[in-house]
């Protein structure tokens, strides 16, 4: 089912599958900010990542001694049907709770909510994780919004970090697993080495399986169009990791700006969930909230 929202400046459509935003259209010029999801290139738009982000080494984790299999990256939330629990003209809330399918892979009771509210400059986007189990659990959560280049050349764009800070890269293998040192310690970091601090050019070369950053202090990261000065920003305040990715098939058509509370699996993973790097622990009855609001300027 598609849920449609509208205000004076924007419209958006959100699918109950994955609670995934399908578009974000500016009324003044009909421009769609979000990638259109051509399946021959990359079929998503802005998926929600839970209960882990990025790669699962070996396609399984071990939780409470049980092998929990995952055949896709980024967990299961993006593939499941959510319930729309609130809808009005410019705001909607979606909810995902445990089921036989999720308990097979994540043996906890939970409530995952995604709230969207259109604003004058874009959309407020809030994700809440609630622990409805009797036990504490660990999890990761993030988003994967793809911002369309709308047919423009890649070299017309840069990724801009608000504070123009020198960037710290997380060292990853070509397959996007965390690298480790000789003692098996991960994650490792290094200076990203950009020419201008906090500015990453978009090029036809792409970002492979992703460029991952940590220790950022910028409140937002944006996709800047150098030709007209416009920018689309996503909120990164409070997020410990940020992933940068673009399509790997053909000429660049979008750039994904991905704030994460979590990190990809390590190349030397022991598969044990409790040992996974970058996880967040949530006690019974508690909730975890993060916001990745999008501004179009």
Image (tube, rainbow, N blue to C red):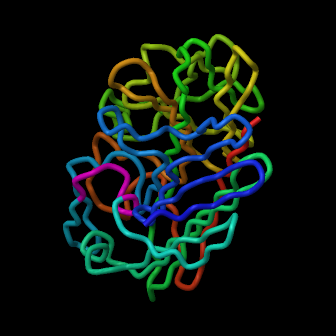
Given residues 34 and 72, the one toward you in this image is 34
Q: Quadrant of the N terminus?
A: bottom left
| Number of numbered tags placed on the structure image | 0
Q: Residue at x 39, y 58 (%)?
A: 78
Q: Is residue 267 left or right of residue 233?
A: left
Q: Residue 35 in magenta?
A: no
Q: Residue at x 26, y 74 (%)?
A: 101
Q: Residue 74 in magenta?
A: yes
Q: Is residue 150 left or right of residue 246?
A: right
Percent position of residue 24, x then y:
60, 46
Q: Residue furthest bottom?
A: 134
Q: Residue at x 46, y 61 (%)?
A: 15
What kind of secondary structure does the magenta stretch mostly adopt? loop
Q: Residue at x 54, y 53 (%)?
A: 261
Percent position of residue 203, x then y:
50, 14
Range of magenta residues:
70-78
Percent position of residue 287, x then y:
60, 75
- To which quarter of the image does residue 92 belong? bottom right
Is the residue 85 above or below the residue 69 in the image? Answer: below
């Amino acid at each position: 089912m598609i849920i449609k929202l509208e205000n004076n400046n924007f419209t958006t459509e959100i699918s109950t599958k994955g609670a995934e935003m399908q578009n974000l259209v500016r009324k003044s010029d009909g421009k769609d900010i979000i990638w259109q999801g051509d399946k021959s290139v990359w079929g998503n738009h802005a998926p929600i990542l839970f209960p882990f982000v990025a790669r699962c080494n070996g396609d399984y984790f071990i939780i409470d001694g049980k092998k929990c299999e995952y055949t896709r990256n980024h967990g299961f939330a993006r593939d499941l049907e959510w319930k729309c629990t609130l809808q009005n003209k410019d705001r909607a809330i979606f909810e995902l709770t445990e089921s036989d399918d999720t308990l097979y892979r994540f043996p906890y009771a939970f409530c995952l909510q995604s709230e969207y509210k259109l604003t004058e400059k874009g959309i407020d986007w809030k994700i809440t994780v609630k622990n409805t189990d009797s036990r504490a659990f660990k999890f990761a959560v993030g988003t994967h919004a793809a911002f369309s280049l709308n047919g423009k050349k890649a070299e017309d764009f840069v990724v801009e970090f608000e504070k123009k800070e020198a960037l710290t890269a997380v060292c990853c293998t070509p397959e996007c697993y965390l690298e480790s040192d000789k003692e098996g310690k991960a994650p490792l970091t290094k200076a990203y080495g950009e020419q201008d601090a906090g500015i990453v050019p978009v090029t036809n070369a792409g970002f492979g399986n992703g460029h991952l950053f940590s220790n950022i202090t910028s409140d937002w990261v944006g996709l800047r169009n150098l030709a007209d000065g416009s920018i689309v920003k996503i909120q990164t305040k409070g997020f410990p990791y940020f992933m940068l990715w673009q399509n790997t098939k053909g000429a660049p058509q979008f750039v994904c700006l991905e704030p994460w509370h979590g990190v990809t699996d390590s190349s030397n993973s022991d598969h044990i969930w409790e040992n996974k790097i970058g996880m967040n622990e949530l006690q019974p009855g508690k909730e975890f909230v993060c916001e990745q609001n999008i501004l179009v300027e």
